[in-house]
Amino acid sequence: MPNMTPDTKLKIQLFLVVALLVAGVRTAIIFYERSAPAKTSQAPPLNPDYYVVPKKLYAYDLKSARQLTEQPVWVKEGYRYSYYPYRNGHADFSHEAGLLLPLEKLAVKDVVTDVTPGSRDERQILAVFEQGGQTYAFPIGSIKQDNPRIYSDEILYIQDPHELYKHWPPEVWQAIDQHQVKPGMSELQVDFSIGLGLLEGTGDSDVRTLNYPNGGKPLRITFRNGKAAEIQPGSNQG
């Protein structure tokens, strides 16, 4: 370029220097991105409750069901199961004595059979316990045509829930033991505290609303992402 002026040459040289610098920076960025460890998305930690596997009795006859007498038991879901006066070897099914309370601790004295009201070929399997100097019983199964069906594992824990869920904070257990509900409690914790909850709608979303009879003090609780978010007075139904 014999006719190129000194000024033009200087501009070209500056352009080439800038271009080289830009190319160098770009190469460095590409090298860093390729050599840097890949970013991985971390899943949230699993709920510790998922690792709790309560022991079950798997009772299959009257003899195996009597293992309930060997340790205390705790009611899984309060205000759901009825119990009846038990006198002279029979339960008075015509007079309900009450409902088993949330996480109520019981000492089962015996497991017996009794007639099923209105049935000629079925007998009830009953767990017998004492309370306030009186004897009561509640059904844990039935026998029909010599085939027992025992569902005590659905009703009772045979391990102390305080030990099973000892990873829960002390303030949560304090609320449960006082049958109170606090914001942030899980559905299981609320069940332990105030018993049976009746779901509104399908409950297929991350927002679920349940109505709790709560022994005549009903509550309506909305859970968001598994945690109690809105706690309101409910209404007595029926």
Image (cartoon, grey):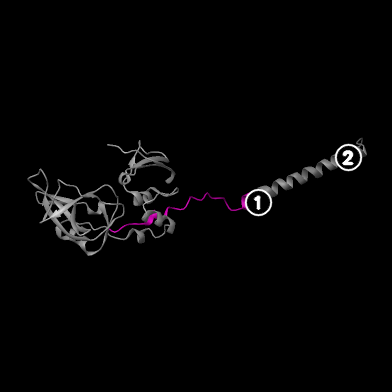
Q: In this view, does 124 lie to the left or right of 131?
A: left
Q: Is residue 180 left or right of residue 5?
A: left
Question: Dot 2, crowdedness within 10 Å: few (<14), some or many (≥20)?
Answer: few
Q: How many labels does the image show?
A: 2
Q: In which quarter of the image is the C terminus?
A: top left
Choose mark 1 or mark 2, whichever is in front: 1
| SS at mark 2 in the image | helix
Residue 169 visible? The answer is no
Q: Mark 2 or mark 1, which is nearer the start of the sequence? A: 2
The amino acid type of the residue labelled 2 equals Lys
Q: Write down the region rendered in magenta.
A: 31-55
Q: In which quarter of the image is the N terminus?
A: top right
Q: Position of residue 81 (x, y in %)?
A: 24, 48
In the rendered structure, does residue 43 fall within the stretch colored magenta? yes
Residue holding disc 1: 32
Q: Is residue 100 left or right of residue 194?
A: left
Q: In this view, does 135 lie to the left or right of 219?
A: left
The amino acid type of the residue labelled 1 equals Tyr
Q: Position of residue 39 (x, y in %)?
A: 56, 50
In this orientation, which residue lies closer to the viewer: 56 or 209?
A: 209
Q: Where is residue 200 in the image (x, y as percent from the top left)?
A: 35, 37
Question: Dot 1, crowdedness within 10 Å: few (<14), some or many (≥20)?
Answer: few
Q: Is the magenta stretch mostly helix, strand or loop?
A: loop
| SS at mark 1 in the image | helix
Residue holding disc 2: 9
Residue 232 visible? The answer is yes
In the rendered structure, does residue 172 fall within the stretch colored magenta? no
